[in-house]
Amino acid sequence: MSTHESLAPADTATSGRIQQHRKYLMCRPEHFTVSYSINPWMEPTRPTDTAKALRQWQTLYDTYLALGHEVELIDPLEGLPDMVYTANGGFLIDGIAYGAKFRFAERVPEGPAFMEWFRANGYEVVEPAEVNEGEGDFLLVGDTILAGTGFRSTGDSHREVGEVFGREVVSLTLTDPRFYHLDTAIAVLDPVEGPSGVERATIAYLPAAFDERSQGILRERYPDAIQVSDADGAVFGLNSASDGRNVIISPRATGFEAQLRERGYTPVLVDLSELLLGGGGIKCCTLELRGVQR
């Protein structure tokens, strides 16, 4: 199925899924390469194709626009090849931007660059004291913040993000180094608000990416969640973006695609295979901007 074909509007009346308008921040991968390794996906000896990365990224950008969403852009900076993964640049709710403080030295300069963009675009910026990698490890589900730890963001950042936003924070521990950020192992499928009485699988997740305690929390809190297979998780199928009806996913996550259709979602297939060489996918390239600017 082509991306164009998959953009056909779903029958909301029969699917029960309601599309919500989204606003995203993205960064063109003009300097994309893999010159160091900070996750198991990155192999500097493997050639990368920047032009191909740009073409694939452009398809994702165009897809968001075709679906009616807004996309803002932050300028890519030379020497920061991972800036394309904007989800790691912060976490925003109600016009407040909690900045990122990266674990690895190679990405540390990204934090100030993103916070400068947030300030320039009217957001109230909270500079972090604790190590965190933004929406890579913080996911908003309803009024709750799911927070990941184990590889990048620290547990202390979970306390800090809760204090910044005054919301419940549920800590989850990642145990598989391939899934080093929470957004590689959980996809938030539904909007914050929806019609009462409509069955909603709020999230999809990969059980094997978490420790037993975290698996128990997810089963208890989200009994209707989609549990994704290891095969679909391993192709970054969960590193996806959803507007409540359309779910942009990797074309290789065929099992997840079928599960989404069964639940009334409309999968939209976008291939970011080149950017996966840096350990990132659709969600990694997509930071949600929540709150009114200016």
Image (tube, grey):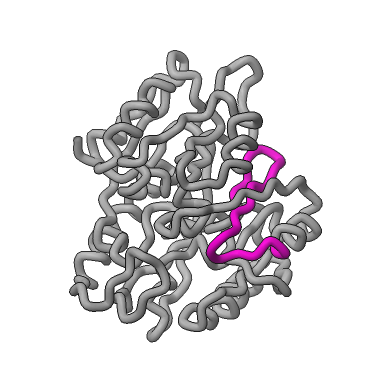
The residue closer to the viewer here, 119 or 89, is 89
The residue closer to the viewer here, 85 or 25, is 85
Can you say which quadrant of the picture contains the N terminus?
top left
Can you say which quadrant of the picture contains the C terminus?
bottom right
The residue closer to the viewer here, 47 or 189, is 47
Tell me: residue 1, above or below residue 166: above
Please indicate whether residue 106 sits to the left or right of residue 92 in the image: left
Please indicate whether residue 196 sits to the left or right of residue 177 in the image: right
The residue at 42%/22% (across/down) is 264
Residue 4, x across and y down, in percent: 24, 39
Most extreme residue toward the front, as rendered?
A: 212
Q: Which residues are magenta?
A: 139-157
Tell me: residue 177, above or below residue 115: above
The residue at 32%/78% (across/down) is 31
Q: Is 120 within the magenta?
A: no
Residue 190, x across and y down, in percent: 54, 34
The residue at 33%/48% (across/down) is 234
Tell me: residue 220, above or below residue 241: above
Residue 112, x across and y down, in percent: 59, 80
The residue at 66%/38% (across/down) is 142
Tell me: residue 215, above or below residue 82: above
The residue closer to the viewer here, 258 or 233, is 233
